[in-house]
Image (cartoon, coloured by chain):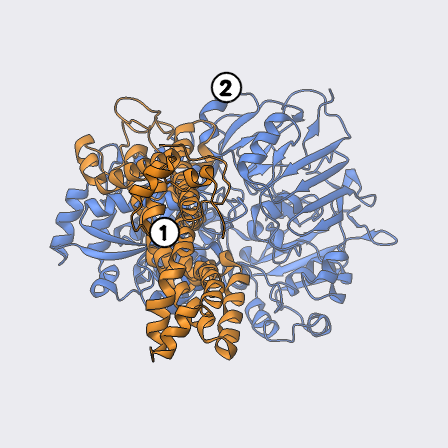
Amino acid sequence: MTVTPPDQIESTGLSSTLPAAVEAIEGRGPWLLAWARLRRDKVAVGSSVVILGIILLALFAPWVAHLVGHGPNTQFRTTGLSPDGIPVGPGSTFLFGTDDLGRDVFIRVIYGARISLLAGAVSAGLAVAVGVIIGLAAGYFGGAVDGVLSRFMDVVLSLPYLVFAIALVSLLGPSLAISVAVIAFFSWASVGRIVRGQVLSIKEKEFVEAARSLGASHLRIMFIDILPNVLAPTIVYATMLIPLSIVFEATLSFLGIGVLPPTATWGNMLSESIAYYKVAWWFVAFPGLALLITTMAFNLLGDCVRDAFDPRGNRLFVATEE
Amino acid sequence: MSKIRRLTVSSTAVTAVGLLLTACTGGTATTNTSAGGQSGTPRSGGTLNLAGTGDIDFLDPTAAYNTDTHTAERAWTRQLFTYPASTDTKTVATAVADAASEVPTEANGGITNGGTTYTIHIRDGVQWNSSPARAVTAGDFVRSFKRLCNPVAPVGAPSYFIATIKGMGTYCKAESKIPGTAKGIADYINNNEIAGVSSPDPKTIVFQLTHATADFLDIIAEPFASAVPVEYLKYVPNSPEFKANTLSDGPYKIIKYVPDSTIVLDRNPAWVASSDPVRKAYVDKIVITEGQTPEAVQRQIQAGTTDLSWDGVVPTPDIPGLSGDPNFAVHSSGAVNYAVFNQQSPNANAAMKNVKVRQALEWAIDKSALAQALGGSKIAKPASQILTPVDTGYKPFNLYPTPGDKGDPAKAKQLLAAAGYPNGLTLKLLYPNVSQSPKIAESMQADLTAAGVKVQMVPTTQNDFVVHYISDPASSQRGLWDITLLSWVPDWFGINGRAVLQPMTDGPNYGPNSVDYGDYNSPVTNGLVAQALSLPVSQAAKVDDLWHQVSLQSMQDAAFIPLTSIDVPLYKSSRLMNPVYLPINQNYDITNVWLKTG
């Protein structure tokens, strides 16, 4: 029998006072424990607040635009550009300055958040859904099914995604839907591998054996018995996948194979701003900062989620005590 | 295949709006401001460092059609005639003798038979750097014409030659069908003659024309008509073997060519300075470094590590900051950005076929905003026709005037309603996703939207833009685009209707690779063009008036929307001296610059 030292009990969130802890012990599962740890993690709370703020700005972007009186695609050719076509800097009229067509960078940044978050969330969601299903199937059935699906995952992981994306866009034309599809296609295989690995281990457990002996169907065993046990690592990976997808979308837009103009995305704003970095720093800085802050917030939150599910793991930013 | 336009300089785009374009010479090119460095005693020596974004299009002069290629090619190829480097705008636009001993005229007997026979003599001292060096002959020039329509790397503008030289059409038609092997091409060239090109002796070449024409010297001054040594028949045109075995009759020779990376030119020992009235060849060596961004090139020039961009212009955002800098100058180019209507498109009930719809859209565009976005009035100006002041036939007019050239969306909307589109219409705006094209497209989209047109943007890669869209009539007929953005610079100035309005309005010859991209085909315009092309030099005033009428008619028919004229902002290092702008190449003449020490 292993005796857990008091300090480790603390780190797992239980009270440091053993007798009181005994009294307070309730039936809390790993999800509740993770949630409790997450709530106490200042980094998690901070990054969540940032993400929430970005989501709110994105949601209320039309309202903000209406309030400011600047549409995301409205070109202020007189007030937003110099006679030589140089963007106007940040000020009271244009909070973040203007771009090369005299459009309000602030409004375009918050509209860009809509695309980034949408692309990030939807493509990550799609990737996780597909990855979980294929990973489950590969790990659970094993044998030839595993062989075929695993090789397929290997193929997907080895494809040069930019070349593929450019080819696809050449055939179908650029759009948000194509961007999301490309991102999801190149992301699901990583999820699939993780899930497959977990399933290979879990399917040997007694409770799975018990379910099987009770006559449970494959689908029931996969989705009712095994899936909940692989959700934790999947959620951690999904949280990490969102910033990756956001950067992926920005990359596609930056290369001109993402969302169609004039729709504002952080990627195409950065692409348009390159030539202006010497004379209009705001044009490159604000969409760049938006991308940096968003991806960093999601990454930090992802780290925290991972730590919350895995209290033994070390991390750079240590959670603070209650 | 008839690519009559000169391709863009700026590496990427053939016809992308807003890039630096090429021009050939012409009558009245003007220099708005001049870079410093014209004065001082020329000094020989040193290495001229050029940097750019892309590579040459073809090393083979027959096929080369980019301004950047022509800039470099001037150092190692020679033509019968060329345009001299000069600060005088008239001089620099008038063809002078290069390998020819003099410009043929009726007075000196060079032009006879009512302007249909040109007899040209080759200058002494023009030599190939063969082993041993040997004289360039009339036969080398005859060979150049015989090689124009080879099936592997043909000339980009065959119609110039086919329309003017007797027997060229027949010769070309057969040549384009021969096997694309070195032997096949050599056999054809050695065993077949062009009826209108002959060399009675090694020093004389005679051209028989189908009719008198005012622009024949400009046509044969094109770099496509560079002399071709007999050795080139051993290689497939523009093949790796060809590229490794080029010969030079200019002041420099190629000593290194790594595609997309480097070109190095060194002095050609066979070149005799007294045989070349055009090139002074002050620098010892020319090094071209490719694969850089325009911004990086600009930084290098400002730092003094590079002397000049060879394929680009000063990036728009840098222009205001360079005002007053003696190394900065803006030069006229004759370039015009314009939008073309696809009259083949079935979209919106074939709206683009409807002249009233096209005329309505002419009113919608804020051209002053486009000029502003392209760098302001120093660089770009609103255009009301395809011709610019450097083109023949140019007379100012504006059939669709709006205050300040800001467009009138309300009027456009009203005219669209009268044309049968009271609820507006949906159109596809095609553009290459390079350089300034996306910016122009977004600006136009905003204007068209205000006029009640829903615009579907169709961005493409540069290659797709040319190959799969605008040069493919099937794409036009399927309605893959309704409006597209292009730039045009004439191959030469002066009497240059053949290099501007004729190809752009050439409906009767619409087909694959036609540059009348929208299939504008007006019997009235066609008649005017035919008349203008059939008149000799002596009727220049009449020719000028006819081209003006063509311009007017094309605007009445709303064949295209002229957007802006574009000038060429160039920046040079402080040590680069004698920067003489060569309009045909839209860059400084690298064979006449010299480098200051210290």
Among the chains, which one is blue? Answer: B
Whole-percent x, y for residue B438 in the image = 38, 46
Question: Which residue is disc 2 drawn over?
Answer: B324
Whole-percent x, y for residue A93 in the image = 25, 24
Query: Circle 1 marks a residue in which chain?
Result: A
Q: Pointers 2 and 1 in contact (CB under 8 A)?
A: no
Whole-percent x, y for residue B583 in the image = 54, 39
Q: Quadrant of residue B475?
A: bottom left
Residue ranking furthest to the right: B132
Question: Which residue is disc 1 drawn over?
Answer: A30
Q: Secondary structure at mark 1?
A: helix
Query: Circle 2 marks a residue in which chain?
Result: B
Whole-percent x, y for residue A231 in the image = 38, 58
Residue A227, placed above or below residue B423 = below
Q: Secondary structure at mark 2?
A: loop
Residue B277, placed above or below residue B193 = above
Count of marks placed on residues: 2
Residue sitting at 62 percent across and 67 percent down? B152
One can see residue A173 in this view: no
Mark 2 burial class by Cα count in 10 Å: few <14, some 14-19, many 20+ = few
- B235 vs A265, left or right, is right
Among the chains, which one is orange? Answer: A
> Is A249 in front, or is B305?
A249
